[in-house]
């Protein structure tokens, strides 16, 4: 047994060597920190003997660190907001980025296509703080572009940062504007990989553009769409902190539609700074995300075995 | 949080692996060193000092000089590590949690919170060390600093000797006061501002009469148990009752006035969401705002803004926990040379040569002397530009070119005027109600700024906010705070 194991090792040494850096990275940054999740059940206190000693010798508090996530009516709001926004982002993000990718791939002038692509790509690299100020220059209540425009048409200006009803749309718009260009690249790359002879054959058979897209491009994109969506579903309980904190400028009156799990945890712990409680929130998000990936993968496998992740 | 939990994950992974690898040797080392420092006159110990501020180019050069001096005096050398303002809180949390070697740590109510980290075990309890090696400190700095910085009856750090009380003032843009010949001698309460605000609103449409940001809280005669959380105790209290500040008459009246000002257009509609009034002070388009003062503050403001600023008191000078804990140096719980660290702190707070070297750098390189205790910065001072408040006793610092001769006398007079808050020295321990505190914090963030800046009508929103605070468990927190306060009063007040 052992002999064949080592023979195997030697035979595949080149491959194994290539895997090594990634494997080490995962070991250090993904598997080892798992031990740290016991902090979620501790009242973490420092000690002279370092992190490990502090961790193991802090007081056990059972599930107490999780309580603050569930014990108020805010629990419903933050869970609803996190889930609904993420579902909207996943669905609309998919539609927009696939559409963008197809449109870009159909542009004949390749120089212009590159230009558009760069333009749509750019917002992805802006930090949320800057995007927050972009939005502010439009929405500022006394000096914003939108209110000035409204006033010049004789319409009453809107107190944007005090009116929750507009924010689901604003947040979804800003999020799509920032991310759609970037995620379309993945789809664009796989469209580029589609065999051109398929389109030629279709054209000879008299298929128009729309038929080509529906019958060739989309079916061939299906596996990558499923993979990307499954990965996104795994993060459905993680909200984009920058989006929900910086873009609404942390305005209290908007919390009913902008408070999500991540902002709730941040606001709740910034004065007390309990390591155990923030670990608890992270653990809760990971566990729910893990279950959702398993469930959605299970559903995908029922429908189409080849497209499932595992 | 998304980002910080992730990076915390990464860091804890790295830390974990290090502590696993080093765990074995660590234990043995500690014992060995402790024995050394007990015996030792031969080898100087190195003190590692973490402090706040933008890292300066010449820190190591200056610390070499400092070390030469301290080696002679107390047989110790100093290694200073500076961490930038915005990073200090988070980096220190990780460094301390991981057991990174360090001896002296800067801490304050604002950066790497003093009380909480003392309770979490980050700092060494120094009652005995202070008596044994810190005599100079006890004799030099205002005793209110040492008594006010006690946590659960013990000292965990040495506060910097500087302005002691905090006092709110109304600051005025003097250009506008002069232009319209406005008189501020009768200004004291929030209500008394009204005629001035009205004049400016009518005559200067481009000026924001009352400059406010989202952190504004009207001046009320209460001391907060935790800065800007609703639990408070009245300053002239006799029964030490903890109340919800939103339910007090004073706060209700203040909020109604604020809302009246807001509706009249004296306050910017953005007030509840802007983080600072820098835009206003830079452009000079404001009449009045509220600030905390210290002696000679008007000169500092005028120098920073480029136009004259005058101020008049809005409250009495009060010595509170927050004002006492503005700048503290603590000894790390994992320090291997706590005695030497205390000797160093003692020297730093009493010896003008050392203190000024740490503050201004090397004579002839970073500054030159132009009087007995007066200096002028040289070109190289920009390579060693340190925040004075965070590095120990301010009252033994050299004067700058334009400082009046009696600068530190003015500080001493200001400190003498300070009235201690009834709960000075009481620090609420929220561990037992941590879950409620997280919920309350969220409610606070939701309603606080818009109420305090007058953006919403208190008649409508105050009852809602009070209701939400109750639902989040404020009553339980107040009950817990009351129990702790009663115990503290029984022990500490006569």
Image (tube, rainbow, N blue to C red):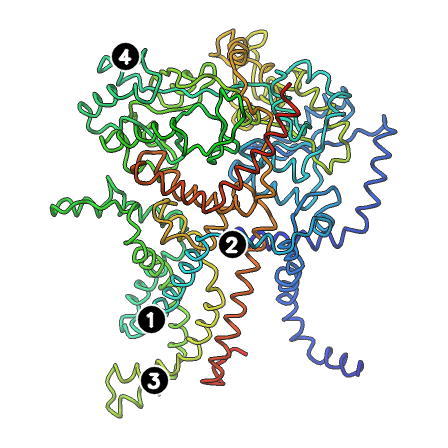
The residue to which callout 3 is attached is A216
User: Callout 2: 10 Å neighbours few (<14), some, many (20+)?
Assistant: many
Q: Which chain hosts label 1?
A: A
Spatial distance from mark 1 to mark 2, Cα to Cα?
33 Å
Q: Residue B305 at x, y = what percent?
A: 36, 23
Please tell me whether mark 1 sits on a helix, a strand or a loop.
helix
Spatial distance from mark 2 to mark 3, Cα to Cα?
47 Å
Residue name at image x 56 percent, y 51 percent: A278
Residue B183: mark in rendering: 4
B403, above or below A298, in the image: above
Sequence order check, earlier mark of 2 and 3 = 2
Between circles 2 and 4, the one closer to the viewer is: 2
Q: Are marks 2 and 4 on the same chain?
A: no
Sequence order check, earlier mark of 1 and 2 = 2
Residue name at image x 68 percent, y 13 percent: B139
Residue A245: mark in rendering: none
Q: Residue A191 at x, y = what percent?
A: 38, 77
Spatial distance from mark 2 to mark 4, Cα to Cα?
53 Å
Sequence order check, earlier mark of 3 and 1 = 1
């Amino acid at each position: 047994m052992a002999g064949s194991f080592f023979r195997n090792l030697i035979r595949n040494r080149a491959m194994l060597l290539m895997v090594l850096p990634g494997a080490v990275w995962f070991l250090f940054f993904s598997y080892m920190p798992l031990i740290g999740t016991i902090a979620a059940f501790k009242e973490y206190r420092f000690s002279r003997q370092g992190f490990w000693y502090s961790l193991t010798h802090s007081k056990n508090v059972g599930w107490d660190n999780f309580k603050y996530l569930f014990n108020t009516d805010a629990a419903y709001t933050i869970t609803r907001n996190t889930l609904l926004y993420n579902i909207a982002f996943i669905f609309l993000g998919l539609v927009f980025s696939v559409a963008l990718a197809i449109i870009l791939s159909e542009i004949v002038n390749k120089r212009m296509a590159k230009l558009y692509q760069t333009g749509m790509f750019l917002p992805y690299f802006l930090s949320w703080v800057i995007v927050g100020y972009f939005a502010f220059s439009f929405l500022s209540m006394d000096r914003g572009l939108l209110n000035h425009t409204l006033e010049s048409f004789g319409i009453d200006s809107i107190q944007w940062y005090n009116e929750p009803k507009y924010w689901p749309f604003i947040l979804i718009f800003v999020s799509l504007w920032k991310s759609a260009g970037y995620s379309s690249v993945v789809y664009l790359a796989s469209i580029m990989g589609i065999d051109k002879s398929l389109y030629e054959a279709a054209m000879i058979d008299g298929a128009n553009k729309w038929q080509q897209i529906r019958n060739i491009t989309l079916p061939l994109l299906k596996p990558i769409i499923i993979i990307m969506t499954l990965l996104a579903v795994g993060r459905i309980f993680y909200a984009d902190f920058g989006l929900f904190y910086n873009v609404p400028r942390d305005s209290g009156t908007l919390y009913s539609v902008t408070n999500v799990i991540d902002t709730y945890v941040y606001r709740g712990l910034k004065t007390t700074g309990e390591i155990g409680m923030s670990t608890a929130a992270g653990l809760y998000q990971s566990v729910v995300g893990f279950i959702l990936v398993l469930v959605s993968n299970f559903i995908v496998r029922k429908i189409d075995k080849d497209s499932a992740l595992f | 949080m998304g980002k910080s939990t992730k990076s915390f994950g990464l860091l804890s992974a790295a830390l974990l692996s290090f502590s696993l690898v080093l765990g074995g040797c660590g234990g043995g080392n500690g014992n060995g060193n402790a024995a050394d420092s007990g015996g030792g006159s031969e080898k100087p110990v190195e003190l590692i000092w973490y402090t706040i501020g933008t890292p300066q180019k010449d820190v190591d050069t200056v610390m070499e000089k400092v070390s030469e001096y301290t080696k002679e005096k107390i047989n110790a050398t100093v290694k200073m590590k500076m961490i930038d303002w915005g990073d200090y809180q988070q980096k220190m949390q990780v460094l301390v949690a991981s057991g990174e070697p360090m001896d002296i740590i800067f801490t304050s109510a604002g950066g790497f919170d003093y009380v909480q980290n003392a309770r979490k075990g980050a700092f060494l309890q120094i009652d005995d060390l202070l008596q044994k090696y810190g005599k100079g400190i006890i004799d030099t700095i205002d005793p209110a600093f040492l008594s006010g910085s006690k946590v659960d009856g013990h000292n965990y750090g040495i506060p910097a000797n500087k302005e002691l009380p905090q006092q709110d003032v109304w600051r005025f843009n003097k250009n506008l006061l002069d232009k319209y010949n406005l008189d501020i001698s009768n200004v004291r309460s929030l209500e008394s501002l009204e005629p001035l605000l009205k004049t400016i609103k009518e005559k200067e449409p481009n000026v924001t009469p009352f400059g406010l940001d989202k952190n504004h809280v009207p001046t009320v005669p209460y001391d907060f148990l935790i800065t800007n959380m609703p639990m408070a105790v009245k300053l002239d209290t006799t029964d030490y009752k903890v109340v919800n500040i939103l339910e007090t008459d004073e706060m209700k009246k203040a909020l109604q006035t604020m809302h009246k000002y807001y509706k009249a257009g004296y306050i910017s509609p953005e007030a509840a969401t802007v983080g600072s009034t820098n835009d206003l002070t830079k452009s000079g388009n404001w009449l009045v705002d509220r600030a905390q003062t210290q002696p000679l503050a008007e000169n500092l403001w005028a120098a920073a803004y480029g136009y004259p600023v005058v101020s008049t008191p809005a409250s009495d000078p009060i010595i509170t926990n927050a004002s006492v804990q503005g700048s503290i140096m603590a000894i790390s719980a994992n320090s291997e040379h706590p005695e030497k660290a205390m000797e160093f702190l003692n020297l730093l707070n009493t010896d003008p040569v050392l203190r000024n070297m740490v503050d201004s750098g090397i004579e002839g390189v970073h500054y030159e002397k132009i009087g007995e205790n007066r200096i002028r910065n040289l070109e190289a001072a920009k390579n060693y530009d340190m925040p004075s408040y965070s590095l120990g006793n301010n009252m033994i610092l050299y004067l700058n070119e334009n400082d009046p001769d009696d600068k530190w006398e003015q500080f001493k007079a200001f400190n003498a005027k300070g009235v201690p808050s009834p709960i000075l020295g009481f620090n609420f321990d929220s561990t037992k109600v941590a879950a409620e505190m997280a919920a309350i914090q969220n409610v606070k963030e939701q309603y606080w700024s818009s109420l305090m800046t007058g953006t919403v009508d208190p008649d409508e929103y105050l009852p809602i906010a009070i209701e939400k605070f109750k639902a989040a468990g404020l009553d339980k927190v107040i009950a817990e705070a009351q129990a702790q306060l009663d115990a503290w009063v029984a022990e500490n007040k006569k």
